[in-house]
Image (cartoon, rainbow, N blue to C red):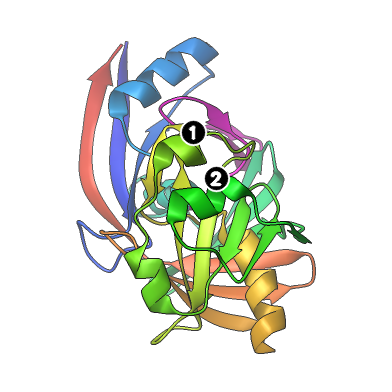
Amino acid sequence: MKLSIFQIDAFAEKVFQGNPAAVIPLEAWLPDDLLQDIAQENNLSETAYFIKQGDGYHIRWFTPMVEVDLCGHATLATAHVIFETLGFQGNEIVFHSKSGELKVTKRNDLIELDFPVSTISQCETPIEIIQAFGKEPVEVWKSDDYIAVYENESDIVSLSPDFSILNKLECRGVVATARGEKTDFVSRFFAPRCGINEDPVTGSAHCELTPYWTKQLGKNKLSAAQLSKRGGKLQCELLGKRVLIAGKAITYLEGSIKV
């Protein structure tokens, strides 16, 4: 069987920035174990698969180890493929997913994701976070991930986590965040339990970060940067129970795979 594959750099101004995602269009769903094997072979933080469904598309996301319920950068990458390569007519795509209906809109050179807000609650600081980061955060919040808040951007840049300790935490991942120097806030995202020690840019984490920083900074529209080695930029806006997350995407690879 031959399948088309695209590799897209999401939340990137140019190639080799942002977060690379594999995007594979399908005519019908393949067995889950095959989808997982392909994602493991691709060895990117996410591989997105989609099929046509009514007037929209059904989308699923796989890390090299597990299927996940929501992924921002791979959704942006998939929308980029549909808009730019597959000849989609219109400016809005509707995806159906494990996280419900997701609308994606093309606005000039930006692609805007309409995602559900993630509920966060303050919690005690797990000892594993202090041990893994070597520095105690100012406060910690919990959602699908732990959110470790630090005093300034330099704290985030200097983190060198012990992933074997972070792997002990019962959560998807850990987000370290602080106010930014050139953007409203910055972050880094670590998810060793999902097979991703550090994710270059994590759209879904901004469903948790946006409500937090909206309250802290007193404004709904925020600029954000993820300070991984590749780096990435995002525009975020809180609208009630939804978060708008916008960024650019660049095609790096178009090809095919045989399975």
At horizontal 30% and vertical 22% (from top left) the residue drawn is: 41
Quadrant containing the N terminus in the rendered view: top left
Q: Using the image as rendered, state which of residue 90 and residue 43 is in the foreground.
A: 43
Q: What residue is rendered at 54% in x and 63% in y?
A: 136
Q: In this view, does 144 lie above or below 242?
A: above
**Image-based side of 114 in relation to 176, left or right:** right
Element at label 1: helix
Is residue 10 toward the left or the right of residue 257 in the image?
right
Q: How far apart are marks 2 and 1 (CA)?
A: 8 Å
Residue 163: within the magenta? no
Q: In this view, does 86 lie above or below 154?
A: above
Q: Mark 1 points at which residue?
A: 194
Dot 2 amino acid type: Gly
Q: Is residue 79 visible to us here?
A: no
Image quarter hosting the C terminus: top left
Q: Name the residue at 25% across, 60% down.
A: 17
Q: Is residue 33 above or below residue 123?
A: above
Pick the residue in front: 50 or 233. Answer: 233
Q: In this view, does 221 lie above or below 6?
A: below
Magenta highlight: main SS: strand
Q: Nearer the viewer, residue 241 or 29?
A: 241
Residue density around tag 1, few if under 14, some if 14–19, many if 20 or more, within 10 Å: some
Left or right of 27 in this view: 220 = right
Residue located 79% across and 65% down the image:
241
Question: Do residues under tags 2 and 1 come within 8 Å of each other at their CB atoms?
Answer: yes
Q: Type of residue at label 1?
A: Cys
Q: Position of residue 163 (x, y in %)?
A: 41, 40
Of mark 2 and mark 1, the one earlier in the sequence is 2
Image quadrant in which you'd find residue 100: top right
Res 115 → quadrant: bottom right
> Would you name the residue on which mark 2 appears?
173
* Magenta residues (range): 46-72
